[in-house]
Image (spheres, rainbow, N blue to C red):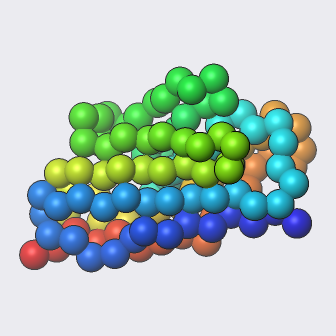
């Protein structure tokens, strides 16, 4: 049984920082990438950042230079360091594990990030 669990969300003032953590537990192999998506109220879920098994990364333009994704492959854990946070970053952040075989993906339950003064 695979579980994907996020932590680290919360309330922060504009300009502040947060670090999100995500661990995929259980027997999980053939990972293509792990990453973060977010969904703000009334909006579609969007990609924030992913890190491939090769170590390559990809970021949404809106977070480039402010967010950094990293991983601990041995622990199937991915991190998202978020700096210079803006109110527009307010959303529920979801961890995604994408595989090259079925089942093709797993999602976490989401963690709320609120940026407000």
**Residue sitting at 37 percent across and 40 percent down?**
68
Say whether residue 66 is left or right of residue 25: left
Q: In this picture, is 106 found above or below 52?
A: below
Q: Quadrant of residue 65?
A: top left
Q: Quadrant of residue 69?
A: top left
Residue 66, position in %: x, y?
Answer: 25, 42
Identify which residue, 36 or 62, lies in the foreground.
36
Q: Is residue 43 above or below residue 50?
A: below
Choose between 74 and 78: the one closer to the eye: 74
Q: Is residue 50 visible?
A: yes
At horizontal 57% and vertical 59% (from top left) the residue drawn is 22
Left or right: 66, with 105 as reference point:
left
Position of residue 106 measured from the top left corner of the image (x, y, whole percent): 73, 56
Q: Which quadrant holds the N terminus?
A: bottom right
Q: Is residue 5 left or right of residue 83?
A: right
Q: Is residue 53 above or below residue 69?
A: above
Q: Residue at x 50, y 59 (%)?
A: 21
Q: Which quadrant of the rendered structure holds the C terminus?
A: bottom left
Q: Whole-percent x and y of residue 25?
A: 75, 61
Q: Is residue 1 left or right of residue 43?
A: right
Would residue 107 be seen by someone viewing this image from the given angle?
no
> As drawn, which residue projects farthest toward the front?
74
At 83% across and 50% down in the image, what residue appears?
Answer: 28
- How many marks on residues? 0
């Amino acid at each position: 049984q695979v579980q994907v669990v996020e932590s680290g969300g919360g309330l922060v003032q504009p300009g502040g920082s947060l670090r999100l953590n995500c661990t995929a537990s259980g027997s999980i192999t053939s990972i293509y990438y792990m990453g973060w998506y977010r969904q703000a109220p009334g909006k579609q879920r969007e990609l924030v950042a992913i890190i491939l098994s090769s170590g390559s990364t990809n970021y949404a333009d809106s977070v480039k230079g402010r967010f950094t994704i990293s991983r601990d492959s041995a622990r199937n854990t991915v991190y998202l360091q978020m700096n210079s946070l803006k109110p527009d970053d307010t959303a529920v952040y979801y961890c995604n594990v994408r595989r090259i075989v079925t089942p093709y993906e797993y999602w976490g339950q989401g963690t709320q990030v609120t940026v407000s003064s």
